[in-house]
């Protein structure tokens, strides 16, 4: 009888440990919906034009652009690989200084362009602990250029030329359109980050801190600019050589807060539907 009880206790303990391990695995490896927000230190790279690349940048604040994305994180291979489709609002562009010999004034040339981007991030994790995973990622993207939104500078898609020492001499501003900007941008962002799993027993949350570098592959000049065909009010340089391209570049930093679709309460995993049932039974908001 004692042996039977002992065997039953051992089986119960093993079952409890197995269930707990499964619950922990679910918390760390569940599909999660996340919000990513951060900034992009943007610039252009000009091919076949060393003079343009050598122009000094304006202040950092005029180059910082917003990044805001909504993504779904899908774990694969027991959480060693994460695939994250994302839709994001991403600001890109450039702000450079040059001396106009014609007008004898220092000019700030600035292009601010916002994109609606579809991005597919593929991350490979390096397991460190149960709650922390460093990772590296690559994210191909496709973006559509957006018009300006309201009067906020951060949401503006416009090209400006402004005299820094003689404001009355030069102060041009035009909205981005197909005459002065390509309508889309294709690129690849590569980088790395840290993925934290925060377990609050009745609630779980994933926090990711990452940085990356964006490489644009598409020429952002409008087709007409290569053939001296933009509208008169365009402030870009005319007759841009065919062999010259203007490519998006940028250093991105962001934080993602994601909510797994599996949650843990006590020793049982439960889903959103279980949380709703618990709330309906007056057992506390979200299981608390």
Image (spheres, helix red, strand yellow):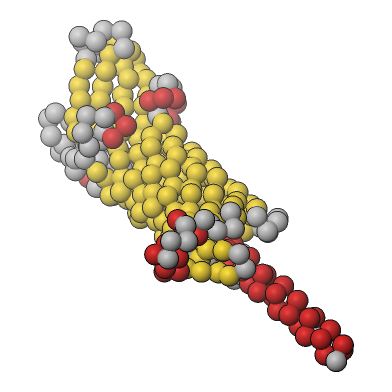
Q: Is residue 9 left or right of residue 118?
A: right
Q: Position of residue 86 (x, y in %)?
A: 40, 56
- Quarter of the image where one finds residue 275: bottom left
Residue 226 in sight:
no
Residue visible at 21% across and 10% down in the picture: 169
- Quarter of the image where one finds residue 272: bottom left
Q: Position of residue 120 (x, y in %)?
A: 43, 59
Q: Is residue 33 left or right of residue 177?
A: right
**Pick the front one: 88 or 248:** 88
Residue visible at 55% across and 69% down in the picture: 269
State the residue lying farthest toward the right. 2
Q: Does 252 sit above or below residue 79?
A: above
Q: Does 174 sit above or below residue 106?
A: below
**Pick the front one: 76 or 272:** 272
Residue visible at 24% across and 43% down in the picture: 146
- Quarter of the image where one finds residue 44: top left
Residue visible at 32% across and 32% down in the picture: 154
Q: Does 244 sit above or below residue 55?
A: below
Q: Does 115 sit above or below residue 204?
A: above
Q: Position of residue 274 (x, y in %)?
A: 45, 69
Q: Position of residue 151 (x, y in %)?
A: 22, 29
The quarter in which the N terminus is drawn is bottom right
């Amino acid at each position: 009888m004692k042996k039977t009880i002992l065997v039953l206790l051992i089986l119960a303990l093993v079952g409890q440990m197995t269930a707990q391990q499964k619950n922990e695995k679910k918390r760390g490896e569940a599909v999660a919906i996340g919000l990513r927000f951060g900034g992009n230190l943007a610039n252009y790279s000009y091919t076949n034009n060393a003079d343009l690349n050598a122009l000094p940048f304006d202040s950092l604040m005029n180059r910082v652009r917003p990044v805001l994305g909504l993504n779904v994180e899908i774990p694969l291979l027991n959480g060693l690989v994460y695939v994250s489709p994302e839709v994001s609002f991403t600001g890109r562009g450039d702000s450079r200084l040059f001396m106009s010999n014609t007008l004898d004034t220092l000019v700030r040339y600035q292009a601010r362009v916002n994109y609606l981007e579809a991005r597919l991030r593929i991350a490979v994790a390096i397991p460190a602990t149960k709650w922390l995973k460093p990772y590296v990622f690559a994210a191909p993207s496709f973006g559509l250029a957006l018009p300006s939104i309201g009067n906020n500078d951060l949401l503006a898609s416009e090209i400006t030329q402004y005299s820094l020492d003689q404001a009355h001499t030069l102060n041009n501003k035009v909205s981005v359109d197909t005459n002065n900007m390509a309508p889309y941008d294709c690129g690849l962002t590569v980088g790395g980050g840290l993925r934290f799993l925060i377990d609050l027993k009745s609630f779980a949350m994933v926090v990711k801190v990452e940085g990356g570098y964006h490489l644009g592959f598409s020429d952002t000049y409008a087709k007409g600019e290569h053939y001296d065909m933009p509208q008169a009010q365009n402030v870009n340089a005319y007759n841009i050589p065919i062999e010259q391209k203007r490519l998006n570049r940028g250093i991105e930093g962001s934080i993602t807060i994601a909510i797994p679709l599996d949650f843990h309460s006590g020793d049982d995993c439960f889903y959103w539907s279980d949380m709703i049932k618990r709330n309906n039974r007056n057992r506390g908001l979200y299981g608390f």
